[in-house]
């Protein structure tokens, strides 16, 4: 039975009862009026009786809660502007926090999306032999570890990724292929949607990612079993990996393998002729109960046994690193994410201060209403609950809107900057995040909504009701509100300082030398594969043809090619003995370039000459860093470097003919590395290279024509990675831009909230003082003096906040050290600009109320008594 | 709730109203006012029921399932709710009445020792 139904005609029943009773009294001889009165008396309090009856069916608290909710909604509707500001403020605070928390949760707290993720280890070698902070393992190590280190490890797999052309009957296209050994399937818990996983030891088997299968092969299941040409070899497509599988493992350059991986190719490591030359990544799964320390010791023992026999220089000049895979993947994001989480909590604090502020103002305005309710018998607890319910409504509305914002923001972040943080793609608004958002909003709203109500309990009912129209501020409220605003200003200042430091960092990174104009430089990559390019001569002929076509391309000012010749060499000067781990024989990036590379790139020649395309014999140009590290204080021109060259696989002396200035053209936030340039005609290998072309005008207009000119030479060689150098550089600092972007949003929100807070307090205080200002003006006060009074009142609060904020920022920006580049965490110009900006904004915020105060008409102000 | 001037009238003990209602309805179904009048008359006007508390009591009994009501028409052709006992209510009345008599006897013994 529905309780509501039962109660429907309760009032009619009672009315009938009263009428019968009246009737009975009339029959006893009373007059109609007397009888009605007597019946009422006999019945007692009708309202109370109804409430008690309702209480039989509906718990009292629930009934009152409904009342409170209805009343709360009515109050919110009555002041739509106020409600909107409070709810949006909360939504902003909760939205930002929810988004950041969901990223924090996905990246740092949740285990990797692989089975037994807590037992997955990353095994790598690092050290002087591997520059750029590269971490890798030689394939010989992998082979022996897998055979011998079996007491700690259940599985040990190696992988690497590369961009390869995948040629089908109809088209050639570049695809990102992961080479993986058999055990990886088990470690990653991969399942196939179609076909099968490779058999142990099976070579040249290719599995497609679900996305690549849908995109390139249009989901045609017949493709399984067919064969394609990948890196010049026929491979068989044996299956399609199930949807949702994420290949999120670190690559050789420490960051994650850039997603998405299009295909997985089986790799079999065999003790072949040059076993140690392959650089691989290793992921391993511990046996249950095994410790990292024991695993590490076991790997070291195996390495020690093979160190002598291994000709590869990795073995003796590197250190073994064994760490949990999760730590390896996300460890470097931790510091930045913590800073972001702290920053976003500060935004929530500012939002809370604002909400408290607004509710305090409202509480002052509602004194009369409260006094009336109190005089009608509402107890303190009941009044408090009314405020709690109103806060709860705000919490739900604000929190709901916040979660919605967070969801939209996350989707947008993942689309715009998916590689900025490892595992970002895993972030979503799930149950955990919802619980977080809900509790954050409820705590915020209740804490800051009920607080003001506590102040109201001191309100003198008698006094308030007597005072007609004009409201005196609740004792202590105005001071409290000013303190809140000062705190907001201080917190906002800290955030804006942080954002300012990051802006300056990026600005410093982008301070390019004269002549280097990355947005005018178009780069694209080529890879020579297939039987047609087996010989060095064929490869060189192709490169020559590319250069010839580029030279005649209209709109191209200069063009060249460059390649990293199989990574790195050690810089050995002829006649000097190599000293292990010596800074004087550092590893250098070994580039093979054409003559056009220097003008196309805007590289500056410091000494000697640049290389030409028709050098009669090998010659080499080095950069400033290389000169300083290998030949400090000496003239490098004429010295000879021991380098492998075409037809000379063993290092032979090559004269240094020039020195060029350092230029950061691949990674903006890294220190320049030593670099060596030899003419491409003498490159020991030339299997892949980048084309660099400097556009006279708009590079976007140039790109298609260069692309088609180069692609026209050989249609089976796809041109890929076509970008301006500006785009390459921007991508190289994606994590920093991500941090800057978020911190910028936080700082902007903080500033906005602080301005709202300042405006709110000053406008309210001006409104309260209208009468007083009217009196002053009537007594002859200058309007200018009134403006000064209001502005000073405002700026006193702001300056107090700024002073505290600067002190706080000086103490706190230190935690951002790792996020900054070439900027001190207490950079005075940044602090000065931020402080000035904040003060100016605050001044603008109180200009409105000040003006309003100046325009008070004394006659009107005094009459409104 | 207010004290009455008349010493001869006794206020009901907590919970006894339920028993009296059940007892009244045992004879015949009745509407609210009839129950009231009946209690007053059968106690020779001694028991004063605050009439307002009748309705919460009726709804308590409805909720427990001891009584139900039908819509009927009263003497002067007005619609009214006629409450009547359910079998469960009848059982409850018997139990309560026995308990009450025991209690009354016990109290009487204490007050007037033989």
Image (cartoon, rainbow, N blue to C red):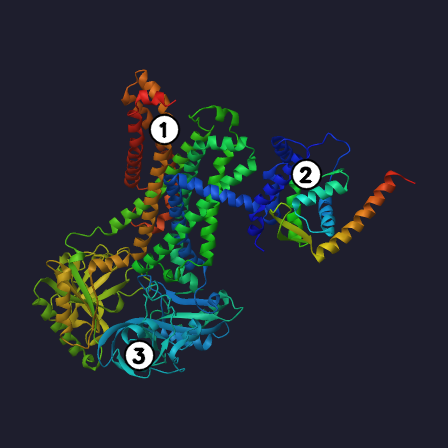
Q: Residues within 10 Å of mark 1 (few under 14, many from 20)?
A: some
- Taking the view exactly as shown, the residue that stands out farthest to the top is A779
**Which is closer to the viewer, label 1 or label 3?**
1
The residue at the point 77 percent across, 39 percent down is B44
On screen, residue A746 versus residue A731, left or right, reads right
On screen, residue A604 versus residue A391, left or right, reads left
Subunit bearing disc 2: B
Q: Residues within 10 Å of mark 2 (few under 14, many from 20)?
A: some
The image quadrant that residue A720 belongs to is bottom left
What separation in Å lies between label 2 and label 3 (alpha carbons)?
84 Å
Residue at numbered disc 3: A220
The image quadrant that residue B56 belongs to is top right
Q: Is residue B99 visible?
A: yes
Tell me whether circle 2 and circle 1 mark residues in contact (CB < 8 Å): no
For residue A767, the mark is: 1
What separation in Å lies between label 2 and label 1 (alpha carbons)?
54 Å
């Amino acid at each position: 039975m529905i309780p509501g139904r039962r109660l429907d005609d309760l009032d009619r029943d009672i009315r009938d009862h009263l009428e019968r009773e009246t009737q009975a009294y009339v029959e006893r001889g009373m007059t109609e009026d007397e009888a009605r009165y007597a019946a009422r008396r006999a019945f007692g309090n009708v309202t109370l009786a109804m409430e008690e009856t309702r209480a039989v069916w509906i718990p009292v608290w629930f009934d009152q809660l409904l009342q409170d909710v209805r009343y709360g909604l009515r109050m919110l509707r009555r002041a739509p502007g106020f409600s909107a500001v409070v709810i949006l403020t909360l939504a902003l605070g909760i939205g930002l926090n929810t988004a950041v928390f969901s990223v924090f949760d996905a990246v740092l707290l949740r285990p990797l999306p692989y089975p037994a993720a807590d037992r997955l280890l990353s095994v790598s070698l690092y050290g002087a032999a591997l520059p750029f902070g590269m971490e890798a393992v030689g394939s010989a190590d992998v082979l022996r570890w897998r055979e011998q280190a079996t007491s700690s490890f259940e599985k040990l797999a190696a992988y690497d990724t590369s961009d390869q052309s995948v040629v089908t009957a109809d088209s050639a296209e570049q695809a990102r292929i992961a080479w993986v050994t058999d055990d990886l399937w088990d470690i990653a818990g991969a399942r196939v949607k179609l076909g099968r996983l490779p058999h142990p030891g099976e070579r040249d088997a290719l599995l497609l990612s679900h996305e690549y299968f849908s995109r390139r092969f249009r989901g045609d299941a017949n493709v399984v079993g067919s064969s394609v040409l990948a890196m010049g070899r026929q491979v068989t497509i044996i299956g399609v990996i199930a949807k949702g599988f994420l290949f999120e493992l670190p690559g050789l350059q420490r960051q994650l393998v850039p997603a998405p991986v299009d295909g997985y190719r089986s790799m079999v490591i065999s003790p072949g002729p040059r076993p140690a030359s392959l650089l691989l990544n290793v992921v391993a799964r511990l046996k249950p109960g095994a410790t990292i320390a024991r695993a590490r010791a076991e790997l070291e023992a195996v390495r020690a046994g093979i160190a002598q026999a291994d000709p590869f220089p990795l073995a003796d000049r590197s250190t073994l690193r064994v760490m949990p895979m999760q730590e390896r993947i996300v460890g470097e994001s931790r510091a930045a994410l913590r800073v972001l989480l702290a920053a976003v909590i500060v935004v929530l604090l500012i939002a809370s201060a604002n909400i408290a502020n607004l509710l305090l103002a409202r509480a002052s305005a509602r004194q009369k209403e409260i006094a009336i309710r109190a005089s009608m018998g509402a107890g303190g607890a009941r009044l408090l609950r009314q405020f709690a319910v109103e806060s709860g409504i705000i919490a739900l509305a604000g929190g709901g809107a916040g979660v919605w914002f967070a969801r939209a923001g996350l989707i947008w972040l993942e689309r715009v900057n998916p590689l900025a943080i490892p595992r970002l793609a895993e972030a979503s608004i799930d149950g955990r995040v919802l619980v977080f958002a809900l509790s954050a909003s409820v705590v915020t709203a209740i804490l800051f909504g009920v607080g003001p109500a506590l102040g109201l309990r001191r309100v003198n009912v008698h006094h308030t009701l007597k005072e007609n129209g004009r409201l005196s501020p609740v004792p202590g409220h105005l001071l409290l509100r000013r303190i809140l605003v000062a705190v907001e200003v201080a917190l906002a200042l800290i955030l804006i300082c942080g954002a300012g430091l990051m802006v300056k960092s990026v600005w410093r990174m982008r301070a390019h030398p004269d002549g280097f104009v990355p947005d005018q430089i178009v780069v694209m990559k080529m890879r020579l594969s297939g039987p047609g390019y087996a010989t060095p001569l064929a490869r060189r002929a192709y490169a020559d043809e590319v250069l010839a076509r580029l030279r005649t391309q209209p709109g191209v000012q200069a063009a060249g090619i460059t390649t990293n010749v199989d990574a790195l060499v050690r810089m050995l000067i002829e006649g000097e003995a190599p000293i292990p781990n010596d800074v004087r024989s550092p590893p250098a990036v070994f580039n093979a370039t054409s003559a056009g590379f220097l003008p196309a790139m805007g590289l500056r020649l410091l000494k000697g000459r640049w290389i030409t395309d028709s050098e009669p014999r090998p010659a080499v140009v080095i950069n400033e860093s290389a000169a300083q590290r290998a030949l400090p204080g000496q003239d490098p021109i004429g010295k000879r470097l021991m380098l492998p060259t075409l037809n000379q696989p063993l290092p032979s002396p090559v004269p240094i003919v020039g020195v060029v200035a350092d230029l950061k053209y691949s990674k903006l936030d890294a220190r320049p590395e030593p670099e060596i340039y030899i003419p491409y005609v003498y490159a020991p290998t030339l299997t892949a290279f980048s084309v660099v072309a400097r556009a006279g005008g708009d590079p976007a207009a140039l790109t298609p024509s260069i692309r088609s000119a180069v692609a026209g030479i050989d249609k089976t060689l796809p041109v890929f990675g076509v970008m301006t150098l500006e785009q390459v550089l921007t991508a190289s600092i994606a994590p920093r831009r991500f941090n800057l972007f978020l911190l910028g949003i936080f700082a902007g929100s903080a500033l906005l909230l602080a301005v709202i807070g300042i405006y709110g307090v000053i406008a309210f205080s001006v409104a309260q003082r209208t009468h007083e200002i009217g009196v002053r003006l009537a007594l002859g006060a200058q309007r200018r003096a009134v403006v000064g009074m209001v502005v000073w009142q405002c700026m006193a609060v702001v300056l107090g906040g700024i002073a505290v904020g600067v002190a706080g920022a000086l103490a706190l920006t230190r935690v951002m050290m790792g996020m900054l580049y070439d900027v001190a965490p207490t950079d005075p110009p940044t602090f000065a600009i931020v402080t000035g900006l904040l003060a100016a904004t605050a001044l603008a915020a109180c200009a409105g109320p000040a003006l309003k105060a100046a325009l008070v008409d004394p006659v009107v102000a005094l009459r409104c008594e | 709730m207010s004290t009455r001037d008349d010493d001869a009238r006794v206020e009901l003990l907590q919970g006894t109203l339920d028993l009296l209602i059940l007892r009244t309805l045992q004879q015949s179904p009745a509407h609210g006012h009839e129950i009231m009048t009946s209690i007053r008359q059968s106690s020779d006007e001694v028991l004063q029921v605050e009439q307002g508390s009748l309705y919460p009591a009726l709804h308590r009994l409805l909720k427990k399932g001891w009584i139900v009501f039908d819509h009927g028409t009263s003497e002067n052709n007005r619609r009214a709710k006629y409450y009547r006992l359910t079998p469960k209510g009848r059982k409850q009345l018997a139990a309560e009445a026995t308990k009450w008599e025991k209690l009354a006897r016990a109290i009487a013994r204490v007050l007037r020792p033989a």
